[in-house]
Amino acid sequence: MDVAIIGAGIAGLACADQLAAAGHRVALFDKGRGPGGRMSTRRVEHEGAAYRFDHGAQYFTARDPDFAAQVARWEAAGIAARWPAAGDDAWVGTPGMNAPVRAMADTHAVEWGARIEALTRTPSGWQLDTRPELYGAVVVAVPAEQVAALVAPHAPDLAEAAAATVSEPCWTLMAAFDRRVAVADDVIRGATGEPLGWAARDGAKPGRSSGETWVVQAGGAWSTKHLEETAEAIVPHLLAALAARAEAPLPPTLHAAAHRWRYARTTGRGAGPAWRTDIGLGLCGDWREGPRVEAAWASGSKLARMIG
Protein backbone atom coordinates (compact mmCIF):
# COMPACT_ATOMS: atom_id res chain seq x y z
CA MET A 1 0.00 0.00 0.00
CA ASP A 2 1.07 3.57 -0.64
CA VAL A 3 0.97 5.48 2.65
CA ALA A 4 1.36 9.23 3.12
CA ILE A 5 2.62 10.38 6.52
CA ILE A 6 2.13 14.01 7.48
CA GLY A 7 4.78 14.91 10.03
CA ALA A 8 8.36 13.60 9.97
CA GLY A 9 9.12 13.87 13.65
CA ILE A 10 9.97 10.89 15.81
CA ALA A 11 6.40 9.47 15.70
CA GLY A 12 5.97 9.77 11.94
CA LEU A 13 9.41 8.35 11.24
CA ALA A 14 8.93 5.43 13.64
CA CYS A 15 5.68 4.63 11.85
CA ALA A 16 7.44 4.93 8.49
CA ASP A 17 10.23 2.57 9.58
CA GLN A 18 7.80 -0.18 10.53
CA LEU A 19 5.54 0.29 7.51
CA ALA A 20 8.50 0.16 5.12
CA ALA A 21 9.77 -2.99 6.86
CA ALA A 22 6.34 -4.53 6.28
CA GLY A 23 6.57 -3.80 2.55
CA HIS A 24 4.49 -0.63 2.27
CA ARG A 25 5.61 2.34 0.17
CA VAL A 26 5.88 5.42 2.34
CA ALA A 27 6.07 9.14 1.55
CA LEU A 28 6.55 11.70 4.32
CA PHE A 29 5.70 15.39 4.34
CA ASP A 30 6.85 17.93 6.93
CA LYS A 31 6.49 21.68 7.13
CA GLY A 32 9.91 22.05 8.76
CA ARG A 33 13.13 22.83 6.93
CA GLY A 34 14.83 19.62 8.04
CA PRO A 35 14.80 16.75 10.55
CA GLY A 36 14.30 17.33 14.23
CA GLY A 37 10.92 18.74 15.17
CA ARG A 38 10.91 19.08 18.94
CA MET A 39 14.23 17.20 18.95
CA SER A 40 15.83 19.97 16.93
CA THR A 41 19.38 21.26 17.17
CA ARG A 42 19.91 24.91 16.25
CA ARG A 43 23.19 25.84 14.57
CA VAL A 44 24.20 29.48 14.89
CA GLU A 45 27.12 31.34 13.33
CA HIS A 46 28.04 34.55 15.10
CA GLU A 47 31.13 36.69 14.54
CA GLY A 48 33.07 33.83 13.02
CA ALA A 49 32.14 31.26 15.66
CA ALA A 50 29.67 28.38 15.33
CA TYR A 51 27.41 27.30 18.17
CA ARG A 52 24.94 24.43 18.46
CA PHE A 53 22.02 24.31 20.86
CA ASP A 54 19.56 21.51 21.64
CA HIS A 55 16.71 23.99 21.98
CA GLY A 56 13.88 21.45 22.02
CA ALA A 57 13.79 18.18 23.96
CA GLN A 58 16.80 18.07 26.26
CA TYR A 59 17.12 14.31 26.65
CA PHE A 60 15.10 11.14 26.33
CA THR A 61 14.60 7.95 28.33
CA ALA A 62 14.45 4.36 27.10
CA ARG A 63 12.25 2.40 29.48
CA ASP A 64 10.16 0.62 26.85
CA PRO A 65 12.00 -2.59 25.78
CA ASP A 66 11.42 -2.00 22.06
CA PHE A 67 12.60 1.59 22.27
CA ALA A 68 15.57 0.55 24.40
CA ALA A 69 16.59 -1.82 21.60
CA GLN A 70 16.32 1.06 19.11
CA VAL A 71 18.42 3.32 21.34
CA ALA A 72 21.05 0.56 21.63
CA ARG A 73 21.29 0.57 17.83
CA TRP A 74 21.67 4.35 17.84
CA GLU A 75 24.40 4.07 20.46
CA ALA A 76 26.23 1.50 18.35
CA ALA A 77 25.99 3.86 15.37
CA GLY A 78 27.46 6.73 17.41
CA ILE A 79 24.35 8.91 17.28
CA ALA A 80 23.20 8.51 20.90
CA ALA A 81 24.95 8.48 24.27
CA ARG A 82 24.06 8.43 27.93
CA TRP A 83 23.97 11.77 29.76
CA PRO A 84 24.30 11.04 33.49
CA ALA A 85 23.95 14.70 34.45
CA ALA A 86 20.23 14.51 33.66
CA GLY A 87 19.65 11.12 35.29
CA ASP A 88 20.70 7.49 35.24
CA ASP A 89 18.31 6.73 32.37
CA ALA A 90 18.92 9.91 30.34
CA TRP A 91 20.13 9.77 26.73
CA VAL A 92 20.93 12.43 24.13
CA GLY A 93 21.56 12.39 20.43
CA THR A 94 25.17 12.96 19.36
CA PRO A 95 26.63 15.28 18.21
CA GLY A 96 23.20 16.96 18.49
CA MET A 97 19.79 15.98 19.75
CA ASN A 98 18.49 15.73 16.20
CA ALA A 99 21.01 13.03 15.18
CA PRO A 100 18.67 10.03 15.65
CA VAL A 101 15.82 11.78 13.83
CA ARG A 102 18.16 12.76 11.00
CA ALA A 103 19.37 9.18 10.67
CA MET A 104 15.79 7.90 10.53
CA ALA A 105 14.79 10.51 7.95
CA ASP A 106 17.74 9.64 5.71
CA THR A 107 16.20 6.24 4.97
CA HIS A 108 12.91 7.67 3.67
CA ALA A 109 11.58 10.00 1.01
CA VAL A 110 10.73 13.15 2.97
CA GLU A 111 9.46 16.35 1.39
CA TRP A 112 10.59 19.17 3.67
CA GLY A 113 8.92 22.56 3.68
CA ALA A 114 5.62 20.88 2.79
CA ARG A 115 2.69 22.37 4.70
CA ILE A 116 -0.28 20.08 4.05
CA GLU A 117 -3.51 21.99 4.66
CA ALA A 118 -6.24 19.68 3.34
CA LEU A 119 -6.96 15.98 2.90
CA THR A 120 -9.43 14.75 0.30
CA ARG A 121 -10.72 11.19 0.21
CA THR A 122 -11.63 10.07 -3.29
CA PRO A 123 -12.87 6.68 -4.52
CA SER A 124 -9.30 5.99 -5.68
CA GLY A 125 -7.48 7.06 -2.52
CA TRP A 126 -6.33 10.01 -0.44
CA GLN A 127 -5.16 13.27 -2.00
CA LEU A 128 -3.00 15.80 -0.17
CA ASP A 129 -3.93 19.39 -1.04
CA THR A 130 -3.89 19.52 -4.85
CA ARG A 131 -1.05 17.05 -5.35
CA PRO A 132 -1.86 14.52 -8.08
CA GLU A 133 -0.60 11.47 -6.18
CA LEU A 134 -3.13 9.20 -4.46
CA TYR A 135 -2.48 7.12 -1.35
CA GLY A 136 -4.20 4.11 0.08
CA ALA A 137 -3.80 5.44 3.62
CA VAL A 138 -2.84 8.63 5.42
CA VAL A 139 -1.11 8.93 8.79
CA VAL A 140 -1.29 12.27 10.60
CA ALA A 141 1.66 12.60 12.99
CA VAL A 142 1.64 16.27 13.99
CA PRO A 143 0.84 18.08 17.27
CA ALA A 144 -2.78 17.89 18.40
CA GLU A 145 -3.39 21.57 17.64
CA GLN A 146 -2.69 20.93 13.96
CA VAL A 147 -4.74 17.73 13.63
CA ALA A 148 -8.34 18.90 13.82
CA ALA A 149 -8.41 20.97 10.63
CA LEU A 150 -7.01 18.06 8.63
CA VAL A 151 -9.20 15.23 9.90
CA ALA A 152 -12.48 16.95 10.85
CA PRO A 153 -14.20 16.28 7.49
CA HIS A 154 -13.37 12.57 7.74
CA ALA A 155 -13.28 11.70 11.46
CA PRO A 156 -15.08 14.37 13.54
CA ASP A 157 -14.63 12.45 16.80
CA LEU A 158 -10.85 12.27 16.35
CA ALA A 159 -10.79 15.96 15.45
CA GLU A 160 -12.72 16.73 18.63
CA ALA A 161 -10.27 14.70 20.72
CA ALA A 162 -7.35 16.56 19.15
CA ALA A 163 -8.96 19.95 19.74
CA ALA A 164 -9.47 19.06 23.40
CA THR A 165 -5.79 18.15 23.88
CA VAL A 166 -3.75 21.26 24.61
CA SER A 167 0.00 21.69 24.79
CA GLU A 168 1.98 23.92 27.09
CA PRO A 169 4.21 26.47 25.32
CA CYS A 170 7.85 27.01 26.15
CA TRP A 171 10.16 29.96 25.68
CA THR A 172 13.76 28.78 25.27
CA LEU A 173 16.97 30.79 25.59
CA MET A 174 20.11 29.80 23.71
CA ALA A 175 23.19 31.53 25.11
CA ALA A 176 26.95 31.25 24.62
CA PHE A 177 29.41 32.76 27.12
CA ASP A 178 33.08 33.61 26.90
CA ARG A 179 33.93 31.49 29.95
CA ARG A 180 32.36 29.04 32.37
CA VAL A 181 29.16 30.07 34.12
CA ALA A 182 29.50 29.73 37.89
CA VAL A 183 27.08 26.84 38.31
CA ALA A 184 28.49 23.62 39.78
CA ASP A 185 26.13 21.18 38.04
CA ASP A 186 25.42 20.86 34.33
CA VAL A 187 21.65 20.73 34.94
CA ILE A 188 19.37 23.10 36.86
CA ARG A 189 15.79 22.11 37.57
CA GLY A 190 13.41 24.96 38.29
CA ALA A 191 11.18 25.46 41.28
CA THR A 192 7.47 26.25 41.22
CA GLY A 193 6.81 29.95 40.71
CA GLU A 194 10.14 30.91 39.13
CA PRO A 195 10.58 31.62 35.40
CA LEU A 196 13.27 28.97 34.97
CA GLY A 197 11.83 25.52 34.35
CA TRP A 198 15.03 23.84 33.21
CA ALA A 199 18.56 24.89 32.31
CA ALA A 200 21.48 22.87 31.02
CA ARG A 201 25.10 23.45 30.16
CA ASP A 202 24.48 22.29 26.60
CA GLY A 203 28.14 22.26 25.65
CA ALA A 204 28.83 19.64 28.33
CA LYS A 205 26.62 17.00 26.75
CA PRO A 206 28.42 14.05 25.10
CA GLY A 207 29.93 14.83 21.71
CA ARG A 208 29.51 18.60 21.92
CA SER A 209 32.21 21.10 21.01
CA SER A 210 30.54 24.52 21.19
CA GLY A 211 32.22 25.81 24.34
CA GLU A 212 30.23 27.27 27.24
CA THR A 213 26.72 27.14 25.82
CA TRP A 214 23.50 27.03 27.82
CA VAL A 215 19.87 26.29 27.07
CA VAL A 216 17.36 27.80 29.49
CA GLN A 217 13.72 26.76 29.17
CA ALA A 218 10.97 28.66 30.93
CA GLY A 219 8.19 26.90 32.79
CA GLY A 220 4.81 26.40 31.15
CA ALA A 221 2.93 28.96 33.24
CA TRP A 222 5.57 31.66 32.68
CA SER A 223 5.74 30.88 28.96
CA THR A 224 1.96 31.12 28.66
CA LYS A 225 1.93 34.48 30.43
CA HIS A 226 4.63 35.87 28.11
CA LEU A 227 3.65 33.92 24.99
CA GLU A 228 3.07 36.87 22.66
CA GLU A 229 6.13 38.88 23.64
CA THR A 230 9.00 39.20 21.19
CA ALA A 231 12.02 36.94 21.34
CA GLU A 232 14.20 39.99 21.98
CA ALA A 233 12.13 40.85 25.05
CA ILE A 234 12.39 37.31 26.42
CA VAL A 235 16.22 37.08 26.33
CA PRO A 236 16.96 39.34 29.35
CA HIS A 237 14.28 37.61 31.46
CA LEU A 238 15.82 34.17 30.97
CA LEU A 239 19.39 35.43 31.32
CA ALA A 240 18.33 36.90 34.65
CA ALA A 241 16.75 33.57 35.64
CA LEU A 242 20.04 31.80 34.95
CA ALA A 243 22.01 34.51 36.77
CA ALA A 244 19.81 34.03 39.83
CA ARG A 245 20.99 30.43 40.10
CA ALA A 246 24.68 31.18 39.48
CA GLU A 247 27.22 31.71 42.24
CA ALA A 248 28.78 34.72 40.51
CA PRO A 249 27.68 37.24 37.87
CA LEU A 250 27.26 35.79 34.38
CA PRO A 251 30.27 36.25 32.11
CA PRO A 252 29.82 38.27 28.93
CA THR A 253 27.53 36.66 26.36
CA LEU A 254 28.89 35.85 22.91
CA HIS A 255 25.42 35.02 21.60
CA ALA A 256 21.91 35.05 23.05
CA ALA A 257 18.59 34.37 21.32
CA ALA A 258 15.17 33.03 22.25
CA HIS A 259 12.85 30.57 20.51
CA ARG A 260 9.13 30.16 21.16
CA TRP A 261 7.68 26.66 21.11
CA ARG A 262 3.91 27.09 20.96
CA TYR A 263 3.31 23.36 21.30
CA ALA A 264 6.11 22.16 23.55
CA ARG A 265 4.63 19.69 26.01
CA THR A 266 1.40 17.80 25.41
CA THR A 267 -1.12 17.16 28.15
CA GLY A 268 -2.37 14.03 26.37
CA ARG A 269 -2.02 10.69 28.14
CA GLY A 270 -2.60 7.07 27.20
CA ALA A 271 -5.16 7.24 24.39
CA GLY A 272 -2.88 5.29 22.07
CA PRO A 273 -2.74 5.66 18.28
CA ALA A 274 -5.96 5.68 16.28
CA TRP A 275 -6.54 3.71 13.08
CA ARG A 276 -9.71 3.79 10.99
CA THR A 277 -9.56 0.74 8.76
CA ASP A 278 -12.71 1.74 6.87
CA ILE A 279 -11.21 4.95 5.51
CA GLY A 280 -7.47 4.30 5.88
CA LEU A 281 -6.75 7.14 8.31
CA GLY A 282 -4.36 6.96 11.27
CA LEU A 283 -3.24 9.31 14.03
CA CYS A 284 -0.12 9.02 16.16
CA GLY A 285 2.18 11.22 18.20
CA ASP A 286 3.06 12.09 21.76
CA TRP A 287 -0.38 13.68 22.24
CA ARG A 288 -1.89 10.21 21.84
CA GLU A 289 0.59 8.52 24.18
CA GLY A 290 2.40 10.83 26.61
CA PRO A 291 4.85 13.78 26.77
CA ARG A 292 8.09 11.91 26.16
CA VAL A 293 10.25 11.12 23.14
CA GLU A 294 9.89 7.39 23.66
CA ALA A 295 6.11 7.77 23.91
CA ALA A 296 6.07 9.45 20.49
CA TRP A 297 8.23 6.66 19.05
CA ALA A 298 6.00 3.99 20.61
CA SER A 299 2.87 5.67 19.24
CA GLY A 300 4.18 5.60 15.67
CA SER A 301 5.39 2.01 15.99
CA LYS A 302 2.08 0.83 17.42
CA LEU A 303 0.13 2.51 14.63
CA ALA A 304 2.26 0.79 11.98
CA ARG A 305 1.46 -2.58 13.56
CA MET A 306 -2.25 -1.71 13.57
CA ILE A 307 -2.09 -0.90 9.87
CA GLY A 308 -0.41 -4.26 9.27
Image: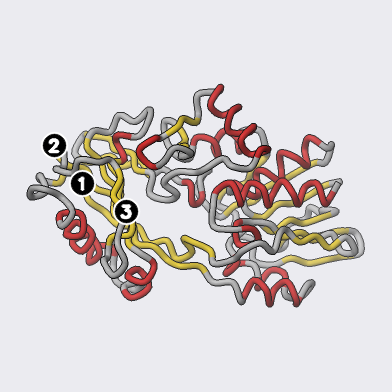
Which mark, residue 189?
A: 3
As helix, strand or loop, the secondary structure at mark 2 comes to loop
Q: How far is the residue under mark 1 from the one under mark 3?
A: 23 Å
Q: Residue furthest front?
A: 88
* Nearest to N terminus: mark 3 or mark 2: 2
Q: Nearer the viewer, residue 207 or 71?
A: 71
Task: Left or right? Give the position of 57 relative to 104.
Answer: left
Closer to the chain start, of discs 1 and 2, is: 2
User: From mark 1 to mark 2, how far is it between C-alphas?
Assistant: 12 Å
Q: Nearer the viewer, mark 1 or mark 3?
A: 3
Task: Locate residue 93, reporting x and y percent.
Answer: 47, 35
Q: Is residue 82 left or right of residue 219?
A: right
Quadrant in the picture for residue 226: bottom left
Q: Which residue is mark 1?
A: 255
Q: Is residue 8 visible?
A: no
* Badge 1 element: strand
Q: Quadrant of residue 252?
A: top left
x and y, in percent, of residue 92 in the image: 45, 37
**Observer-nearest of 77 and 231:** 77
Q: Secondary structure at mark 3?
A: strand
Q: Which residue is mark 2?
A: 179
Mark sitting earlier along the chain (1/3): 3
Circles 3 and 2: CB atoms closer than 8 Å: no
The one of 99 and 61 positioned closer to us in this rendering: 61
Residue 185 in view here: yes
Look at label 3 and name its amino acid. Answer: Arg
Looking at the rendered structure, the kind of residue marked 1 is His
Q: In the image, is 11 to the left or to the right of 276? A: left
Q: Quadrant of residue 18?
A: top right
Q: How is the image coloured?
A: secondary structure
Q: Is residue 40 above or below residue 108?
A: below
Q: Which amino acid does the dot numbered 2 rest on?
A: Arg
